[in-house]
Amino acid sequence: MTTVANLQDMELVRLATTGSVDDGKSTLIGRLLYDSKQIFQDQLEAIEEASRRRGTDYLDLALLTDGLRAEREQGITIDVAYRYFSTPKRKFVLADTPGHIQYTRNMVTGASNADIVLILVDARHGILEQTRRHAFLASLLQVPHLVLCVNKMDLVGWSQERYEEIVAEFRHFASRLTIHDLRFVPISALLGDNVVEESENMPWYNGPSVLHLLEDIHVGSDRNLIDCRFPVQYVIRPHTLEYQDYRGYAGTIRGGVWKPGDQVIVLPSGFESTIESIDTYDGPLDEAVPPMSVVMRLSDDIDVSRGDMIARPNNRPHAGQDIDAMVCWMTETPALRPGMKLSVKHTTRWAKAIVKDLHYRLDINSLHRDEGAQELGLNEIGRISLRTTVPLFYDDYRRNRYTGAFILVDEATNNTVGAAMIVGPTE
Amino acid sequence: MSSKYELTHLQALESESIHIIREAVAESERPVLLFSGGKDSACVLHLAVKAFWPARLPFPIMHVDTGHNFPEVIEFRDRTVEQLGADLIVASVQELIDEGRVVEETGPRASRNRLQTEALVDAIDKYQFDAVFGGARRDEEKARAKERVFSFRDEFSQWDPKNQRPELWSLYNARHRRGEHMRVFPISNWTEMDVYQYILQEGIELPSIYFSHRRRVFERDGMLMAESPYLQLMDGETVFEADVRFRTVGDMTCTAAFESKAKTIEEIIEEVATTRITERGASRADDRVSEAAMEDRKREGYF
C-alpha cells in the first residue's frame, strides 16, 4: 500500500503477462491485484453479479481482466489490458496480453517496453507450443527477465518431480534463445500458493513467491548507460522578454549518462559542440540518464531540429539507409512483400521506406526459417532489408531497445502495420 | 533510491507523460487540452507547462461547460487560466440547447452529462483540433484499461475498440486525415494514488470541493448529491448538512459527494490508501447505467 511515507522511494516496473485463460493467467492476476488490495469493493460486487448472471458457481476473477463487452460475450481477451498494482517498494504497470496465436501482435506490443515477462504453464500439460512461442517473443523483444510460473501444482499433487521435469524442458528450449535472466516458480493461482505468500504445500521449493520475486528482480541496470543517445523531439524557443535568446532541444534520453560540459555531435549535420546546460522546469541537472525528459542547450549556435540525434563524437550510432530488421507484421491486408512502400517512424524521425528483401519467415513455434516465403501475413515474423529515403541514426536492438526499434505505417490508411527490431546495416 | 541513476516512480511517470505531450504537439497541427478543473486535468496541465518550459503553453485550454458546474470549479478554472496566461475556449452545452441543436433531458433525474459529448465533438469540428489532450487514466474503468495513449478518432469522433493501432515502445503514431483526430492521454499509466502523490510533491492546486467542507446534501441511490438548482428532490429525499468532499469533478447532477474529514492532500492520500471503493463507483452516477456504460459512451465520442 502506498502512502505519503513512501512517496519518494518507489520504483516503476513494467511487467507483461501471457498465457491462455486455461493456464489460469487471469486468476493469477486477479489474485495479485486482490492480495495487494487493488481490487475494490464495487469491482468485486460487479464481478459477483456478473458471475451469477453467467451461471458460474465460483467468483470468476478472470472477469476482472476482460474489459470489453465483445470479450465478455465471447469469453476471450482481444486486446492488451493495462493493470496497476503496487507493493511498498514498487509500482507495477502490468500489460496483460492474450495468449492465443492470433494475438501475437498484442504480446509483442505488451512486451515491447516490459522489464519482466511472466509466462504461465499448466503443470498437467507442461511446455506447449504456445509456451515456446511466448518465450521466443519475449526473447525477440529482449525483455530482460523472464519468469515461468508453473501453475496448477495442486492438480499434480504438488509434485516436485513434475515441476523439475517442466523446468528442465523449458531450460533446454530456452538455451536456443537470448534470455538474460530466467526464473521459475511453482504455484497454484487458484489456492494462492506461492503467489503472494509462500506455499506450505511445497516445502521442497525454497525460492520466493511470485510477488516477492517481482519485488526483488533488479531492473535498474537493464538500461543502456553507456551509449549517449538523445533524439531531438521538439525545439523550445520561448520568444519572451525573459528568455529572448533561449534555444533548447527537448527530448527523452535513450542512452548514456549526460553532463554539462560533455562534447557532443549532432546528426545528420555532424556539427560538434558541448552541452551548456541540461534544463528542466525544476532547475538544471548535474547529470541526466534514461528515460528522463529534459531540455539540452548547446554552447554553439548550430541548426538542430526535430528528428536529429545528439550523441558523443567518439560513440555514434549507426547512420544509414539500408537496414536489416526482424519484423512482426500486424495487419491482415496488405501482406508485407518485397517492393512495398511504407512510412517508418524511428525515435522522433519519420522516413519513407521500401522493402528490398524478405530473407525468411520464422515459424515462431519451431524456430524454423522458411527462406522461400514470398510474404508476411498478420502475426507473422520475418527478417527484411529496408531502404529508407533519409538516413536513420540507430543502434542494434540488442544494444538499445529504443534506438533499435521502429514502427511501419501504411501510407494509405495511416495504420501502424509492423513493429521492427533492427539487426544491423544490410550487408 | 539506492543509486542516483534510479528514478522514483513519480519521476518515471512524469517523464513518460512529458514525452507523450511533446510528441503529440510535434505531430499535430492544432492541439488543445481538455480541462475540467478536476485533479486529473490539473495534473495534465501541470505536466504540459513543464514539458514546454520556459516557453508558454503552445496550445489553448478547452472546458466543456454543462452550465451545471460547481461554482468553486469555475472559479478555479478562471484563476488557473489567468495565472498561466493561457487561452481558454469554453464549449457550452447551454449554447447548444439554446440553439435547439440538442434536447435536454427532463425530470428529477435529468442530467446534461450526455450532452457534454455533443458539445465536445462540436467544438473539435469548429476549431479543427487534431490532437485533444485528456486526463483519463487506465485504472479508472475497464474500457479505459484497453485504450491507447494516442487514441484514433474518425471524422465522427468515434472510438473503435477492436480497431486500435498497436502502440509499441515509445513510438506513437499520430497520423490522421483531415477531419480525423487523436485523443491523447498523457497520464494513462497513472493511478489515482499516483495523481495525489504527484499533486502533493508538486504543490499543484485543486478546487476547494476536493477538501472536506460543510454542505447541504441529500441521499439518492446510496450516494450523497449536492443540493443545487439543477436537481429536483424526489419523494422521500430530504436535505441535510454534512462534512463532505468530492473525489471527482463533473456536472453537479451526476457527481456525488461522500462524508470525509480530509482537509489536506496528505489526509486525502491516507483516505485513498484505506478506501475500498473506486472513485467512479463512489461518485459517478453516469457509470452506473450498465456494465458497459463507459464503453458505449466512449464509442460515441466521450473522452
Image (cartoon, rainbow, N blue to C red):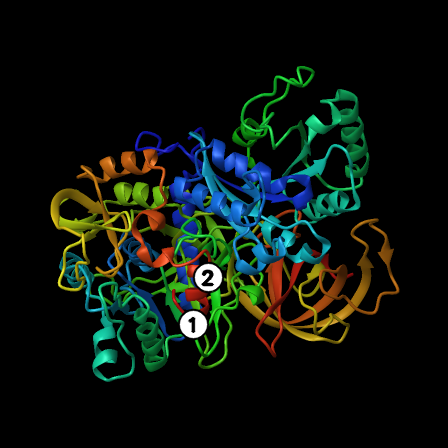
Q: Nearer the viewer, residue A160 or B223?
A: B223
**Furthest-top residue in this view:** A203
Residue type highlighted by circle 2: Glu
Q: Earlier in the sequence, mark 1 or mark 2?
A: 1
Q: Amino acid at mark 1?
A: Ser
Q: Residue at x 21, y 75 (%)?
A: B94
Please say if B131 is above or below A126.
Answer: below
Which label sits in the foreground, 1 or 2? 2
Task: Identify the residue position indicated by label 2 in the image.
Answer: B295
Residue extending farthest right: A372
Q: What residue appears at the point 46 percent right and 68 percent down from the top-left corner?
A: B299
Residue tagged 1: B28
Instruction: Name the quadrant containing residue B62.
Output: bottom left
Q: Are marks 1 and 2 on the same chain?
A: yes
Q: Quadrant of the N terminus of chain B?
A: top left
Q: Quadrant of the C terminus of chain B?
A: bottom left
Lateral position of residue B298 relative to residue B86, left or right:
right
